[in-house]
Structure formats: C-alpha cells, structure tokens
Image (spheres, rainbow, N blue to C red):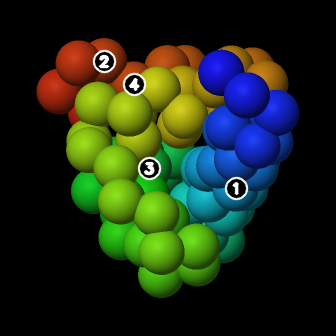
Amino acid sequence: MGLRDRLAARQRHTQLLAAANRTIHTQLLHGNTLRPEPATMVALSFAMFAIRLDAAEARDYLNAALAERGYPLLNEGGDQ
C-alpha cells in the first residue's frame, strides 16, 4: 500500500467516524432513545462525503463511536 493509498484510507476512516458521531448526535437530539441505525449512517455517509458502505461496516463505525462514549453496542441486527 503506497502513501497515497494510506492517506486515502486514513481520510475515509476519519470521515466515517465523523458520520458515526453525527448519526449518534442526531439520534440523541431528535430521538427518544439511543438507537442509531446502520441504515441512517449509510445514508448520512453518502450525503456528507459521497462514501458508499454496507450496513455491517456502518455498524462497526457506530459501535466504535458508541464504545468511545460508554454506550451499549449494537448487535449484528443493528439493535442494542
């Protein structure tokens, strides 16, 4: 993996963490429970950064952001 690939991967990772944080933040402000959905993050990632990802990858990023805040993680189905 060359330097350009590593930089692109780092940028994508940073952008997806930002989308996960935004998904959680939006759910906290506008939702009645902390149940961020991977599908919401998939849509938000595309809207914010034109990044396409699947629900499993979105769930992984959401779980990373949830763990950082000390919240329960999502299971395989997306529910907590």
Q: Dot 1 surroundings within 10 Å: few (below 14), some, or many (20 or more)?
A: some
Res. 74 mark: 4
Q: Residue pushed farthest left?
A: 77
How far apart in space, not on screen, are marks 4 and 1 (Cα)? 20 Å
Q: Dot 2 surroundings within 10 Å: few (below 14), some, or many (20 or more)?
A: few
Q: Residue pushed farthest bottom?
A: 47
Going by the numbered disc 3, the residue's amino acid type is Pro
* Near-viewer residue (37 or 80): 37
Image vertical order of residue 42 relative to residue 13, above or below = below
Q: Dot 4 surroundings within 10 Å: few (below 14), some, or many (20 or more)?
A: many
Image vertical order of residue 13 relative to residue 53, above or below = above
Position of the C terminus by quadrant: top left
Q: Earlier in the sequence, mark 4 or mark 1?
A: 1
How far apart in space, not on screen, are marks 3 and 1 (Cα)? 17 Å
Q: Earlier in the sequence, mark 3 or mark 1?
A: 1
* Near-viewer residue (69 or 51): 51
Residue at position x 36%, y 70% from top?
A: 43
How far apart in space, not on screen, are marks 2 and 4 (Cα)? 4 Å
Going by the numbered disc 1, the residue's amino acid type is Gln
Q: Which residue is mark 2?
A: 75
Q: Earlier in the sequence, mark 3 or mark 4?
A: 3
Q: Earlier in the sequence, mark 1 or mark 2?
A: 1
Position of the N terminus by quadrant: top right
Give coordinates of residue 51: x percent, y percent: 46, 63
Residue at position x 35%, y 59% from top?
A: 52
Residue at position x 55%, y 34% from top?
A: 61
Left or right placement of residue 32 versus residue 57 in this view: right
Q: Secondary structure at mark 4?
A: loop
Number of numbered discs on residues: 4
How far apart in space, not on screen, are marks 3 and 2 (Cα)? 12 Å
Label 3–label 4 contact, CB within 8 A: yes
Q: Which residue is mark 1?
A: 15
